[in-house]
Image: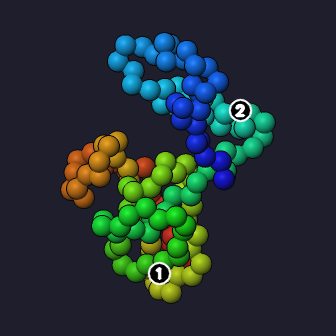
Amino acid sequence: MIKNFVIDADLEAFYPDLESYRSGAQPDFSEQISLAFRSLLNDLQARGRNPRLLGVPLDLNRDASSTHRQHLESNTASGAENGYAWEGNRERRFCVNVTTKSVLGDEWVFTLQGSNKTERPDSSDSTWTTVETLSWAAAS
């Protein structure tokens, strides 16, 4: 999986005077590092690779009180269930693998929502927006 591990100290080791290039209110080079990583992902895509398949997978198998998990765990879900990825680590890939559906008479609806807040908002917060809704038909 591809992940951006570059930090300011790595850049300053090769370019000691790099700090003088920061703008007045800029505390670090995280914005430039993020832009460079996106440029790398665009370059991979231009070469015929799918960068989303190289990203760290998003683990939604969490409750509101959980901490960061180091690996994905499978989950048996039933009824209305909520999962969180707020304690994640800048994942860039989302994957759903449904192996069985025990109740064939019900349509399943999976809704992925996100928020741009820096801290996890309450469930009723107005900043949650629906990113995608996936439906599985009752007969499948």
Q: Is residue 31 visible?
A: no
- The three-letter code of the residue at mark 1 reads Thr
Q: Earlier in the sequence, mark 1 or mark 2?
A: 2
Q: Quadrant of the C terminus?
A: bottom right
How many residues crowd around disc 2 within 10 Å: few (fewer than 14), some, or many (20 or more)? few
Foreground residue among 125 and 30:
30
| Label of residue 88 in the image | none
Residue at 35% across / 67% down in the picture? 66
Label 2 element class: helix
What amino acid type is highlighted by mark number 2? Asp
Residue matched to label 2: 43
Horizontal placement of 130 versus 92: left or right?
A: left
Between 95 and 62, the one nearer to me in the picture? 62
Q: Is residue 70 above or below residue 6?
A: below
From the top left corner, tell me how far across and down residue 105 is, in percent.
46, 84
Residue under label 1, please give it.
76
Question: Residue at left 56%, top 58%?
Answer: 57
Give residue 26's position: percent from left, percent from top. Answer: 39, 21
Mark 1–mark 2 distance (CA, rounded to whole Å): 38 Å
Up-down: is 65 above or below 99?
A: above
Q: Mark 1 falls on what kind of element?
A: loop
| Image height of 119 relative to 22, above or below | below
Residue at coordinates 26% horizontally, 52% vertically from top-left? Answer: 121
Residue 133 x/y as whole percent: 44, 57
Q: Residues within 10 Å of mark 1 (few under 14, many from 20)?
A: few
x and y percent of residue 19 in the render? 49, 18
- The residue sitting at 49% across, 26% down in the picture is 29
The answer to whether residue 120 is seen in the rendering is yes
| 1 and 2 marks in contact (CB < 8 Å) | no
Q: Is residue 48 left or right of residue 18?
A: right
What count of labels does the image hold? 2
Q: Quadrant of residue 39?
A: top right
